[in-house]
Amino acid sequence: MATQMTKLFGEESQIMEALMQASPEIVFPQPGTLVEGTVTDIHKNKILVDLGGITTGIIAGKEAHDSHDTMRELAPGDNISAYVIEGENSDGLAVLSLRRASQEKSWKMFVDAYEEGEIIQATASEANKGGLLLEVDGIKGFIPVSQLAPMHYPRVNGADSNLILKRLQDLVGKTFDVKVINIDHENGKLILSEKAAMQKQRDNSLGKLKVGQKVKGKISGIVKFGIFVAFDGLEGLVHISEIAWGHVKDPAEFGRIGDEVEILVIGMEGEKISLSMKRLVPDPWVEAAKTFKIGTVVEGEINKITQFGAFMQLSEEINGLIHLSEITEEPVEDASTLLKVGEKVKAKIISVDPDEHRIGLSIKALTAKPKKAEVKEEEAAEEAAPEEA
């Protein structure tokens, strides 16, 4: 009988051992890992999660809020992924975090994008004088000014830091296509580049671009020496001399940032592109050669004074030069002592050069005395007149 009982217990022991070996290993939540579970209860700012019948986890306080606002949509029975902060607290519950879980997923996304060279989207939340900042689940990203695409690069006169900051602040809240160009896992920081995300497009566009080609773009910057235009991922400069046929005092009078414009490519040197706006409209100097003839007396307003003379506006786009030597018979060292901007004067056209876009004017030609030979002829004519009568 005893032998029979021993045999029976031995068989049961073997069965139990076999069952235990066949059963999956019970793994308790380990801090620093992600676990899957089912929501069992939601109360105010606390979430209870069943972790596969092994134990129960709790998510509370700030750990219940992530960048996706997951808690707002949660309901009992939903499956969620959570980060284990503590294996077991004093109440015997595993301490979990939705916030850290979202952070881990976001970090993995950034790492994968960095390793694969993928383009991702990022929304700027703040700006400083050095660039744009963003934060996703505690991960901090930075887009330096130098890594912004042409359309967003803050081109300002004199590199004024306050104007740069203002331009950057206008970009806060905007979503950018970027690439991760540097990653600091230890400190949870990223360096992002909008320029790198557009490099392929830039290369393709640059390869197709030709001198003499007309393109459409948007004004990306206005400075004292010209207008920058962004197009097809590229950027070029319309120098102040290529904005209009007439004298251009302030490029800002010819457009605003964001305005769409049509331009002509007139030069390429590497990635340096020279553009023109004025060459897309007829050259008024062609018509000027027909209108303004040598010897004609014209009247106009002085619109600019330089060290070598004064410019008179003859039409909307045509100016004539009154050289220092053509103001009076007496030597003149400074035109501003005799002429003022805004003053209306009369002058005689003494030269026209449409190829060089120059018209020479003279004030002194209107007041010059006749030469001696001319005076004698006039006197002789006066003496002969009574006899003829």
Image (cartoon, rainbow, N blue to C red):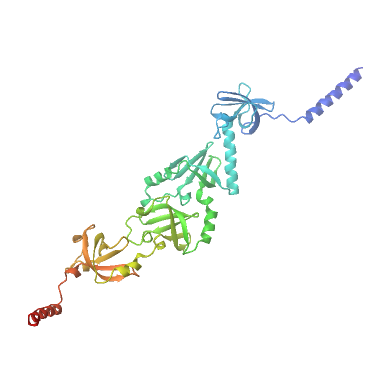
In this view of the protein, which residue sits in the foreground, 302 or 389? 389
In this view of the protein, which residue sits in the foreground, 339 or 278? 278
Q: Where is residue 56 shown, x and y percent of the image? A: 65, 25
In this view of the protein, which residue sits in the foreground, 26 or 283? 283
Q: Is residue 243 above or below residue 175?
A: below
Q: Where is residue 74 shown, x and y percent of the image? A: 60, 29
Question: In the orientation shown, which residue stands out farthest toward the front?
Answer: 389
> Which residue is rendered at x = 35% and y = 65% of the image?
284
Task: Indicate the quadrant where residue 79 lies.
Answer: top right
Question: In the orientation shown, which residue stands out farthest toward the right?
Answer: 1
Do we see residue 334 in this rendering? no
> Which residue is rendered at x = 44% and y = 61% of the image?
264
Do we see residue 255 in this rendering? yes
Q: Is residue 362 above or below residue 342?
A: below
In this view of the protein, which residue sits in the foreground, 95 or 232? 232
Q: Where is residue 187 shown, x and y percent of the image? A: 53, 39
Horizontal relation, residue 360 to residue 382: left or right: right
Number of residue marks: 0
> Which residue is rendered at x = 52% and y = 51% of the image?
196
Q: Where is residue 318 shown, x and y percent of the image? A: 31, 63
Quarter of the image for the C terminus: give it: bottom left
Quarter of the image for the N terminus: give it: top right
